[in-house]
Amino acid sequence: MAKETPRRTNVWRSIFLAVGFSALAISLLLYFTHTNLSSLFSLVNLWYFLGALALILLNWVLEAERLCAISNLLGYKLLFSKAFQIVLVGSFFANITPFDTGGEPFQLYLLAKNGVGAGKSAAIIMIKGIMSALARITLGIGIPLWLLLIKRAWQLPIGLNTALNIGIIIYGVATVFMLLVSWKPQFLNHLIQWLFSRKLIQRIFSRERLEALGSKITGGVNEFRESMHSLAQADKKTILLIAIYSLLLWVIVLTVPALLLWGLGVYSPLSQILAVGIVFYLASAYAPTPGSSGVAEAGFATIFYTAQLVPYPLLGVFVTLWRLLTYYMSFLIGGLVSLFSFSKKKR
């Protein structure tokens, strides 16, 4: 069954925490780097900033195109306008929930509202997650390896290498789990049955409630299995296109910091910026604060400054501009789209 409409109190509390943590981190960065907020845009070349903005917009478009392509593979034609809406709503809820976990449940909700079955919706989101994880791991391993091969004089500091290794391990485990569920969907049934047989769970939920929930999950798993079978027989060119979309999405995300640095007059090599960026995204994938707020700003500043890619006086400006484009834009626009989507459902 699709996820219910979110409660207003929970949403507003999450928004307050997310914005609060982020604003505090940015304020501290600007204060310690002696930067005035009013001079923020006077320090960056407008054309580079607009280029970074265009990349963010392109990212949303490619996300929606990928969602349409995956839906088509599983036999459901999703309109681009609906896919674009789902992408923005998912982005908003990911931005206000711990570990960025809120986005996918609400994408499932909107897919179901557009007539996609629960199991097929789960398959669409699962495929999207697997492709994203594989693309991130590929870049996470490939970029540093490529750097070591062609630029032996430049190496990541020990701390960044450690963060990279931890991120790869976490993402590897998550990806293996998703692949296992995709390959053997019945594994999820066995896992749920084992979980429901635990005494603690049985004390919390009634037997009737667990049986009803188990039936729904079994039905969803069966539909998911059928969807994955359809995927195995799908057009390989479309699957390749989805993989290319996934890689491009991450390349775009990693290129935004490069444009901002160049716009600030700091011409660090693109290869090094990409390497440090993927280390950051691997290491911060499971930050516990809403939308990784506070942790993202502090981690991004630390990792780029430690790698000597940005001078200290520009650190606050750099992080603020980056967060403005990669977080606050989707936060604001996604929030407006979410407000429209859920208020429309209540009428």
Image: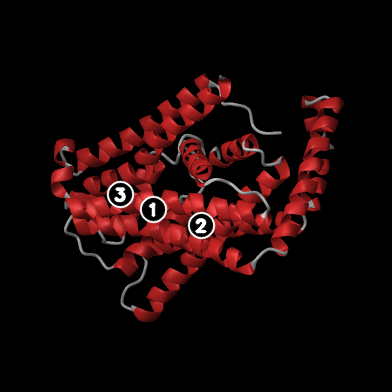
Q: Quadrant of residue 333?
A: top left
Circle 3/circle 1 CB separation < 8 Å: no
Q: Amino acid at mark 3?
A: Leu
Do we see residue 62 in this rendering? yes
Q: What residue is shown with label 3?
A: 53
Residue 304, position in %: x, y? 31, 56
Quadrant of the image occupied by residue 1:
top right
Question: Mark 1 = which residue?
Answer: 58
- Distance CA(mark 2)–CA(mark 1): 26 Å
Q: Tag on residue 167?
A: 2
The quadrant of the picture occupied by the C terminus is: top right
Expressed as whole percent of the image width and height from the top left, the position of residue 163 reads 45, 58
Q: Earlier in the sequence, mark 3 or mark 1?
A: 3
Percent coordinates x, y for residue 308 in the rendering: 26, 61
Q: Amino acid at mark 1?
A: Leu
Rounded to the nearest whole Å, what is the CA distance between mark 3 and mark 1? Answer: 9 Å
Depicted 59 relative to depicted 21: above or below: below
Q: Alpha-carbon neighbours of circle 3 within 10 Å: few (<14), some, or many (≥20)?
A: many
**Viewer can see residue 165:** no
Which element is circle 1 on? Answer: helix
Residue 246 to residue 205: above or below: below
Q: Is residue 124 left or right of residue 324?
A: right
Three-letter code for the amino acid on which mark 2 is drawn: Gly
* Rendered position, 211 above or below 279: above
Dot 2 lies on which element? helix
The reply to whether callout 2 and callout 1 are in contact (CB within 8 Å) is no
Name the colouring of the figure: secondary structure
Whichever of labels 2 and 1 marks the residue nearer the N terminus, that label is 1
Which residue corresponds to the image point at 46% horizontal and 40% vertical from the top-left?
88
- Residue at point 40% right, 64% down? 158
